[in-house]
Image (tube, grey):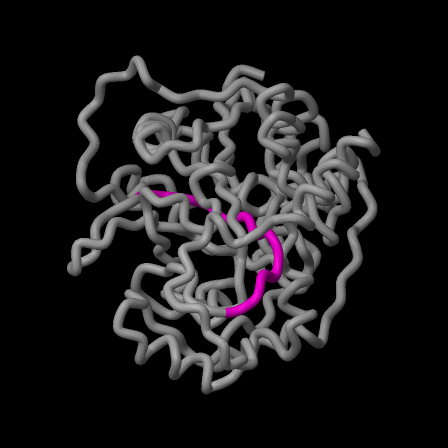
Amino acid sequence: MILLLITTIIFVLFVDNENCHLIQQNKTYFHPLSDKLITFINKHPNSGWKAKRTSRFITVQDAKSMMGVIFEDSNQRKRIRPTISHDNVNIELPKFFDSRKHWKNCSSIKTIRDQSSCGSCWAFGAVESMSDRICIHSKNKISVELSAVNLLSCCTRCGFGCKGGIPGMAWDYWKYEGIVTGGSNETHTGCQPYPFPKCSHHSSSRGYPPCESYNFSTPECHETCQDDYGKPYKKDKFYGKSSYNVAGEEISIMKEILLNGPVEGGFYVYEDFLNYKSGVYKHITGSYLGGHAIRIIGWGIQQNHIPYWLCANSWNNQWGDKGYFKILRGTNECGIETMVTAGLPNLHK
């Protein structure tokens, strides 16, 4: 396993711009958190999206610490788990699809969580999608929030906790070890709620402390539920029936979401993304920061005929478009279509 992690880290370090469609090579350096960068994006005739000043990140290093994805090499992904393409599935794909509306009784799909000041996006993208799929496949009979901290702290083979993890391994862990329930630090619900508080991911913090004031370490793994929860740890676990890669093709991903629910996606993050506010994101300018995991919940076409993926982030609902963002679809923008992972719930275990 150590060799696997070393190999994947090397894969990350040598990533380049080939999967991001840089509109214009900007020779003038803009600080990634500056008004000049935002003005450059908003005035660019071909950007397709709008930026807004954010106080979420004080330094570039602070932003990098939130990028918690360790990407698997494509050959490793194929060796470890199957890849699903749905090539033999004949299904009409709508021009617009939003999981929040299609499965409107599944409240987890509408929930935007907050990873706080911890590089746990890989765990959030996983447990959020798993929670959605439990509701969807149980036909709304089971509504849960799986615990991000349980996965983050106990899945040692997933990576390094708050310092980064492998999304695919998170889905494998769900299948073999199971994950207990757990809501946010604020709601304090479930067996193991998230221990870290919400923090400001937006210039208007509305009472949230700035994230840079925290620097959380990975919690220890505890095989117990919080006091007075009323259910033993092992009895609270939910398991996956399967874990798999989704083929890196637009149609395959659309079919997977339509058939089974939201998926976990990973992509290469550049400095301009930090300031996203609305529209269809595509990389314009700025340096590479790291890998980030999110939940892909649907797709559509912008008014100017630009196709997009609809994604849910884990930086609370004050960041971006109320916690969501759109990213260019069909061109593998920043690798978004080659790093999709999913699985099916085991409702009888």
Residue 242 percent across, percent down from the top left: 54, 19
| Vertical side of 29 occupied by 150: above or below | above
Please say whether residue 70 is visible from this viewpoint. Answer: yes
Q: Which x, y percent locates residue 168?
A: 60, 32
The answer to whether 214 is drawn above or below residue 130 in the figure is below
Q: Quadrant of the C terminus?
A: top right
Q: Judge from the rendering whether residue 29 lies leftward or rightward of residue 332; answer left or right.
A: right
Q: Residue at x 33, y 72 (%)?
A: 50
**Residue 309 vs residue 56, the one in the foreground:** 309
The quarter of the picture where the N terminus appears is top right
Q: Residue at x 63, y 45 (%)?
A: 148
Occupied quadrant, residue 31: bottom right
Is 287 included in the stretch rendered in magenta? yes
Q: Position of residue 91 (x, y in %)?
A: 21, 22
Q: Chief secondary structure of the magenta span?
A: strand
In the image, is residue 164 above or below residue 4? below
Q: Residue at x 40, y 29 (%)?
A: 141
Can you see residue 229? no
Residue at the extreme bottom: 35
Q: Which residue occupies the foreground of this view, 322 or 207?
A: 322
Q: Position of residue 264 (x, y in %)?
A: 49, 40
Magenta region: 286-298
7 and 94: which one is in front? 7
Q: Is residue 279 left or right of residue 272?
A: left
Residue 215 lies within the magenta run = no
- Picture residue at 40% right of the left edge, 25% below the top: 137
188 vs 171, nearest the viewer: 171
How many numbered marks, from 0 up? 0
